[in-house]
Image (cartoon, rainbow, N blue to C red):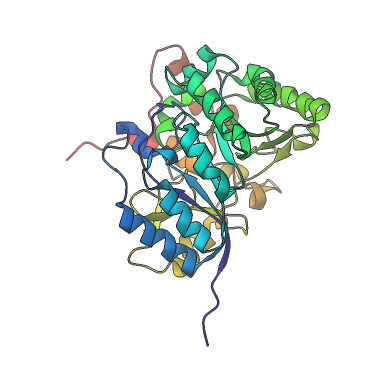
C-alpha cells in the first residue's frame, strides 16, 4: 500500500541569493555579501529539487522568492514544474526587474498574485529603505504586471522610518490600483539584525501605522493584513477591526517552509537553522522533524505567565535569536519595552554611542 503524502500549507522557494536592491531590512543572511558566498543552485538541480519536494509533500501552494526571483533566467522552467504538479503559485518580487516580456509571459500561468513592496509614497522615502534608483522601476513593474492582467498585491515593511507615513503609502497603492496590502512589521532577522536600532519600530510607531491602516480599511475597503507576529501584549488586535493579524505559523497547519538557495529546508524564510537537505533526505520526513514539531514547546521566559504563549510564542523567534541569542529569543519588538539592557543598547546606538551587535554576529576570541 502506498504511503500517503503529508499535507502542508506552503513552501517558499528562494530561487537565488542575488537581489538588485540593497534593503536594510532584508532577513536573508546572504544579503551580507550580496549573495556571493551562496549563489544559486544550477537549473537541473533546482528543477529536480522542486519536483521532489512537490512529489513527496502535498503543499497547498508555493511562494517563489529570493533574492529577486525574476533575476533567474530559468524562472519559467520552475513555473512549469509547479504547474505540472497542479500546485498554485504566488511570487514575491521588488518589481524592478519586471519587463513587459516577463509580465506578458507570466500572465497565462495565472499566479495567485505578485507581491511588490513599496516602503514610501515618495522616491526619497522608498529608496531610504532599499537603495537608490529603484522607486521608478518598482512603479513600472507594478504597472506592467497589471497591464497584462497579473494580480498585484502590495507590501509595506513598516519601520521606524516610515511608520508615520503608512497612510500615504497605502494611498499610493490605491492610485496604482492595488487594494490588497501586506503590512510587514520590520523584524530584525538575518542581515536586518544589524539595522535593529535604525529600523525597529516602537509600540507608538506601530499604533500610528495601524491607525492609518484602519482608516483605509474602513473607508476605502482595502484588504490589509499584518503578516509579521504582533504580540497582543504590545498591540491590542481588536482595536483595528479592519486589519487582519497573523501570527508565527511554525509548527501549525499554516506553516510555510523555506527551501533555500543551497537546497536546505528551514522552518521559514527568516529562520537560519537548517532542518535538512532535500537532495539527500526525504521532504516527507523533514516536514515532520523535531525542529518543526517541537518548535512551539519552548517560549521566552517573559511569556511564561501569558495565556497567549502557545499561540503567540513570543512573536518572531527568528528575530529574537538573531538579536538577543538562543538563550532568550524574545522578539525585539517586545524586548525593547521590557528588557532594560536591550532598551539601553538601542538608545545608545541611536545616539551613535555604541552599536547593537546581533547575537549571531558575535565571534568568540580564540583561546
Residue at the location (44% across, 31% down)? 97
User: Residue 360 at x, y = what percent?
Assistant: 36, 38
| Image quarter hosting the C terminus | top left
Above or below, 84 against 216 in this view is below
Q: Residue furthest left?
A: 367
Residue at the location (73% across, 39% down)? 244
User: Residue 287 at x, y = what percent?
Assistant: 49, 63
Above or below, 287 against 158 in this view is below
| Whether residue 344 can be seen here | no
| Whether residue 285 can be seen here | yes
Residue at the location (52% across, 39% down)? 104
Residue at the location (47% across, 15% down)? 350
Q: Left or right? Give the position of 292 relative to 154.
A: left
Above or below, 7 against 230 in this view is below
Q: Residue furthest bottom?
A: 1
Q: Left or right? Give the position of 96 relative to 335.
A: left
User: Residue 39 at x, y = what percent?
Assistant: 29, 43
Q: How many marks?
A: 0
User: Residue 65 at x, y = what percent?
Assistant: 47, 43
Q: Quadrant of residue 277?
A: bottom left
Q: Left or right? Give the position of 164 relative to 76.
A: right
Residue nearer the viewer, 242 or 143: 143
Amino acid at each position: 500500500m502506498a504511503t500517503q503524502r503529508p499535507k502542508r500549507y506552503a513552501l517558499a522557494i528562494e530561487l537565488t541569493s542575488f537581489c538588485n536592491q540593497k534593503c536594510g531590512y532584508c532577513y536573508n543572511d546572504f544579503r551580507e555579501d550580496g549573495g556571493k558566498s551562496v549563489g544559486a543552485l544550477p537549473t537541473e538541480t533546482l528543477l529536480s529539487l522542486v519536483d521532489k519536494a512537490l512529489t513527496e509533500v502535498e503543499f497547498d501552494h508555493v511562494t517563489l522568492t529570493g533574492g529577486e526571483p525574476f533575476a533567474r533566467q530559468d524562472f519559467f522552467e520552475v513555473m512549469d514544474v509547479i504547474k505540472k504538479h497542479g500546485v498554485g503559485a504566488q511570487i514575491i518580487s521588488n518589481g524592478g526587474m519586471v519587463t513587459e516580456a516577463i509580465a506578458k509571459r507570466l500572465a497565462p500561468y495565472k499566479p495567485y498574485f505578485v507581491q511588490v513592496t513599496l516602503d514610501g509614497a515618495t522616491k526619497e522615502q522608498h529608496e531610504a529603505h532599499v537603495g537608490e534608483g529603484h522607486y521608478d522601476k518598482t512603479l513600472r513593474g507594478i504597472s506592467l504586471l497589471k497591464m497584462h492582467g497579473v494580480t498585484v498585491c502590495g507590501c509595506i515593511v513598516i519601520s521606524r522610518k516610515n511608520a508615520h507615513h503608512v497612510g500615504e503609502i497605502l494611498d499610493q497603492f490605491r492610485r496604482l490600483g492595488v487594494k490588497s496590502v501586506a503590512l510587514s512589521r520590520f523584524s530584525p532577522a538575518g542581515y536586518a539584525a544589524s539595522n535593529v536600532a535604525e529600523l525597529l519600530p516602537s509600540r507608538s510607531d506601530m499604533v500610528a501605522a495601524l491607525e492609518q491602516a484602519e482608516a483605509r480599511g474602513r473607508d476605502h475597503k482595502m484588504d490589509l493584513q499584518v503578516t509579521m507576529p504582533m504580540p497582543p501584549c504590545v498591540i491590542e488586535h481588536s482595536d483595528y477591526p479592519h486589519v487582519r493579524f497573523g501570527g508565527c505559523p511554525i509548527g501549525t497547519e499554516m506553516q510555510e517552509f523555506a527551501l533555500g538557495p543551497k537546497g536546505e529546508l528551514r522552518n521559514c524564510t527568516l529562520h537560519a537553522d537548517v532542518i535538512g537537505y532535500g537532495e539527500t533526505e526525504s521532504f516527507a520526513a523533514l516536514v515532520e522533524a523535531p525542529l518543526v514539531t517541537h518548535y512551539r514547546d519552548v517560549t521566552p521566559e517573559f511569556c511564561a505567565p501569558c495565556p497567549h504563549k502557545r499561540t503567540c510564542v513570543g512573536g518572531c523567534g527568528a528575530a529574537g535569536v538573531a538579536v538577543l541569542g538562543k538563550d532568550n529569543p524574545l522578539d525585539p519588538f517586545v524586548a525593547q519595552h521590557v528588557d532594560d539592557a536591550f532598551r539601553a543598547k538601542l538608545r545608545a546606538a541611536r545616539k551613535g554611542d555604541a552599536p547593537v551587535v546581533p547575537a549571531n554576529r558575535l565571534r568568540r576570541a580564540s583561546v
